């Protein structure tokens, strides 16, 4: 018998990360009369992307910049297609959010005039090793109720209204049924859809948090929410092996990319796009082409930056990605004397760098009543980073507070709760039934093999065509049925089982999106060898999808692009 | 093995059911063996190398290692949180034995040795 625990709340936040914590604070500050509850699969003090720390706030309006200049930049950086309304609205709140977090104790580097020290055009430097605990303490002191180690498995729905969520506790094994008037989904993006860069005991040495496995996308897909732009995957340029962010070096030390021959290929081959300042997809696409055409390895040329800069780089990595420093120590690498080798990662789905995620309105309402989305899980607004995720949390919290007076608490039917409990615990039950079943790791390997080989993985230089995607579609179609045979031995494995079940749902939608956009808009993120050119006449629009709840078919559709900020869409 | 808990240094945080290292791992990879009163990394293959476990251990019992595939062992990187909790000093030693230190501003939040779980029984000895 599985014990049930019933929780009732006004506002429910799924995922106590960057966006979730900020949303909780805003909700409690603006609407103290409402109960705010956070469900977090790990411990809120060190969960999600921020667990290891941050060394910069990557979206900020430094002196002289405006929401319009930001939109222009993000638009050109995303190859001419973004939700300008969303990007503009988040940038208007950067200052509000950053000032708040500074007040809570985050050290932000300032000059003698008290102005923040920029690191590149849109970034400021922070000492963010403890950024996550700083946020979580703020959320708790504001009065949000936090459930740690609570793995959410699905949304509760009543027609097209979302009425809560269900999940299980990793610690006490109980099944939680949470009823809410408004639900914010803030579970981050998805790693682990494709084969990771490293194997063995480093297979989770990914750039994106390996514990963000697309749960929020998957729950929305299953509930019939409209999704956008999954085809704009994120392939990150990262340091070789350690997979640490390269912005720290490129922006922090002004190091350009060079190939094996020392040629500054971004300048020689992508000058018209801005050379080393070309849009982000091209800064991954450029090195991939160098390697593909035999001119690799590729480096960030740090030679001659001097010992002071090297020390600064190391300090910056220690605040965010300490293993980069240990890698240099273990391999006797001095970036002043030798260039830093880089590589590209497996493709991730991350709405905060690219724009895969829920289709939302200006208030971050999804297409399902009572459901809101913020952060990496929300679509249409790339270049969010931590500050944009905060801003979206604030926007969604304000909207929930306003909308909530019109919403009642709905009681989910017993049939729905029973079915959800069965679904959540099925892998454990399989063990009790003595089934051999499929271990989560095997299911993951199968998923990653299909995606890697037929849906544009690193081994095919991220390229794909219709035929490959048709095979991917066919192979993936076998998996949802087999999910019933996944077996878990304990609660930790039950979490692992759901992490791969969720990714299967995400992967199926991803493949449909990749197959639908018949152009190449974001090279490497989305490289179609059968449609290699950008096609503004036919494809300057958003590709969206809805999975039919009854039949399970994924219905594709498009939504128009709207230019709000005037100017050449391909120039920053 | 990315991080390693030295059993000689780990005191299990006394009678803690859920010591800091176990609580702060975002992947839920560390467990405490209550029989011997020591914590260990149960799922090394799932480790992200993010280091909260190391930073919160009051005994500094957790060592940071690079996966062997990335380079030879012998280098060292260890964070020390200042008593004032507003600085962290990283002690580094490269493969040749050359030492370096980095002191960085931060704001470390106080952390309890134990924490209870919402709605009842504690984890490790709970079984379905
Ligand atoms: C290594 C790395 C370095 C970065 N460096 C920078 C930087 O220096 N500057 C910058 O501006 N940006 C940086 N970014 C980007 C930025 O961190 C992210 O865009 C942002 O933190 C995402 O916020 P989020 O709230 O969407 O997700 P997260 O902060 O990851 O929060 C998601 C939360 O949901 C929880 N969750 C997931 N699934 C479930 C479930 N099923 N049930 C319950 N809870 C669940 C997770 O545990 C997590 O706590 C970096 C990202 C990474 C990965
Ligand atoms: S925090 Fe340190 S001393 Fe405490 S149980 Fe973990 S490893 Fe042992
Ligand atoms: S380094 Fe991170 S993922 Fe690995 S055990 Fe420590 S806290 Fe967990």
Image (spheres, rainbow, N blue to C red):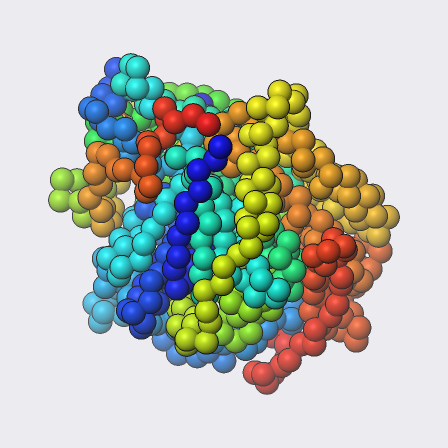
The residue at the far left in this view is B84
Residue at image coords 40%, 63% = A11
Q: Position of residue A395 (x, y in %)?
A: 43, 71
Q: Is residue B74 above or below residue A333?
A: above
Q: Position of residue A147 (x, y in %)?
A: 36, 47
Q: Position of residue A437 (x, y in %)?
A: 66, 25
The one nearer the camera, A535 or A545, is A545
Residue at image coords 32%, 54% = A145
Q: Is residue B110 above or below residue A374?
A: above
Residue at image coords 63%, 76% = A569
**A452 to the left or right of A54:** right
Q: Is residue A153 above or below residue A327?
A: below
The one nearer the camera, A236 or A335, is A236
Q: Is residue A487 above or below residue A265?
A: above
Q: Quadrant of residue A60?
A: bottom left
The one nearer the camera, B107 or A422, is A422
Q: Quadrant of residue A427?
A: top right
- Looking at the image, can residue A257 be seen? no
The one nearer the camera, A483 or A374, is A483
Q: Position of residue A330 (x, y in %)?
A: 42, 27
**A545 to the left or right of B19:** right
Residue at image coords 44%, 35% = A173
């Amino acid at each position: 018998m599985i014990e049930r625990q019933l929780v009732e709340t006004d506002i429910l936040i799924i995922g106590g990360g960057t966006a979730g914590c900020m949303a909780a604070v805003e909700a409690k500050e603006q609407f103290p009369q409402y109960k705010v509850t956070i469900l977090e699969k790990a411990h809120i003090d060190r969960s999600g992307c921020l667990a290891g720390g941050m060394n910069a706030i990557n979206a900020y309006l430094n002196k002289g910049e405006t929401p319009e200049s930001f939109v222009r930049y993000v638009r050109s950086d995303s190859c001419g297609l973004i939700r300008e309304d969303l990007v503009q609205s988040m940038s208007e709140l950067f200052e509000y959010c950053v000032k708040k977090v500074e007040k809570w104790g985050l050290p932000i580097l300032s000059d003698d005039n008290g102005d923040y020290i920029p690191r590149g055009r849109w970034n400021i430097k922070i000492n963010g090793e403890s950024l996550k605990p700083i946020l979580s303490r703020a959320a708790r002191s504001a009065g949000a109720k936090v459930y740690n180690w609570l793995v959410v498995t699905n949304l509760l729905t009543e027609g097209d209204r979302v009425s809560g969520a269900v999940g299980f506790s990793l610690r006490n094994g109980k099944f939680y049924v949470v009823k809410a008037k408004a639900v914010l989904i803030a579970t981050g993006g998805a790693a682990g859809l494709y084969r990771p860069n490293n194997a063995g005991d480093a297979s989770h040495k990914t750039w994106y948090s390996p514990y963000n496995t697309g749960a929020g996308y998957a729950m929305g897909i299953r509930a019939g929410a409209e999704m956008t732009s999954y085809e704009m995957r994120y392939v990150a340029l990262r340091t070789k092996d350690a997979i640490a962010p390269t912005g720290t070096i490129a922006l922090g030390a002004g190091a350009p990319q060079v190939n094996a021959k020392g040629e500054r290929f971004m300048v020689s081959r992508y000058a018209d796009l801005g050379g080393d300042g070309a849009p982000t997809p091209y800064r991954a696409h450029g090195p991939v082409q160098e390697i593909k055409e035999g001119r690799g390895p590729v480096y960030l040329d740090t030679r001659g930056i001097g010992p002071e800069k090297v020390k600064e780089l190391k300090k910056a990595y220690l605040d965010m990605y300490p293993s980069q420093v240990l890698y240099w120590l273990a391999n006797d690498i001095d970036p002043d004397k030798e260039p830093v080798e880089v590589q590209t990662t497996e493709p991730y789905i991350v709405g905060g760098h690219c724009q895969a995620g829920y289709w939302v309105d200006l208030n971050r309402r999804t297409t399902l009543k009572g459901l809101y989305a913020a952060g990496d899980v929300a679509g249409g607004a790339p270049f969010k980073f931590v500050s944009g995720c905060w801003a979206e949390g604030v926007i969604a919290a304000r909207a929930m507070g306003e909308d909530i007076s019109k919403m009642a608490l709905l009681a989910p039917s017993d049939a729905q709760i029973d079915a959800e409990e069965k679904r959540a615990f099925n892998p454990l039950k399989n063990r009790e039934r003595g089934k051999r079943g499929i271990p989560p790791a095997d299911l993951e390997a199968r998923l990653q093999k299909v995606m890697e080989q037929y849906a544009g993985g690193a081994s095919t230089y991220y390229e794909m065509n219709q035929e490959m995607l048709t095979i991917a579609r066919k192979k993936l179609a076998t998996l949802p049925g087999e999910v019933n045979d996944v077996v878990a031995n304990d609660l930790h494995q039950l979490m692992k089982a759901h992490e791969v079940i969720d990714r299967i749902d995400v992967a199926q939608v991803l493949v449909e999106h990749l197959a639908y956009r018949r152009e190449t808009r974001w090279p490497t993120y989305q490289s179609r060898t059968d449609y290699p050119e950008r096609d503004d006449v036919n494809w300057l629009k958003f590709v969206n999808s809805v999975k039919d709840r009854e039949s399970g078919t994924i219905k594709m559709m498009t939504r128009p692009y709207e230019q709000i900020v005037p100017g050449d869409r391909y120039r920053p | 093995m990315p991080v390693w808990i030295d059993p000689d240094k780990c005191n299990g945080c006394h009678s803690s059911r859920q010591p800091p290292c176990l609580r702060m791992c975002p992947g839920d990879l560390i467990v405490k063996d209550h029989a011997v009163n020591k914590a260990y990394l149960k799922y090394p293959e799932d480790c992200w190398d993010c280091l909260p476990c190391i930073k919160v251990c009051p005994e500094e019992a957790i060592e940071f290692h690079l996966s062997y595939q990335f380079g030879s062992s012998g280098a060292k990187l260890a964070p020390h949180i200042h008593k004032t909790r507003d600085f962290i000093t990283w002690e580094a030693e490269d493969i040749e034995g050359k030492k370096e230190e980095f002191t960085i501003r931060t704001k470390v939040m106080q952390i309890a040795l134990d924490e209870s779980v919402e709605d009842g029984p504690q984890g490790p000895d709970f079984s379905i």
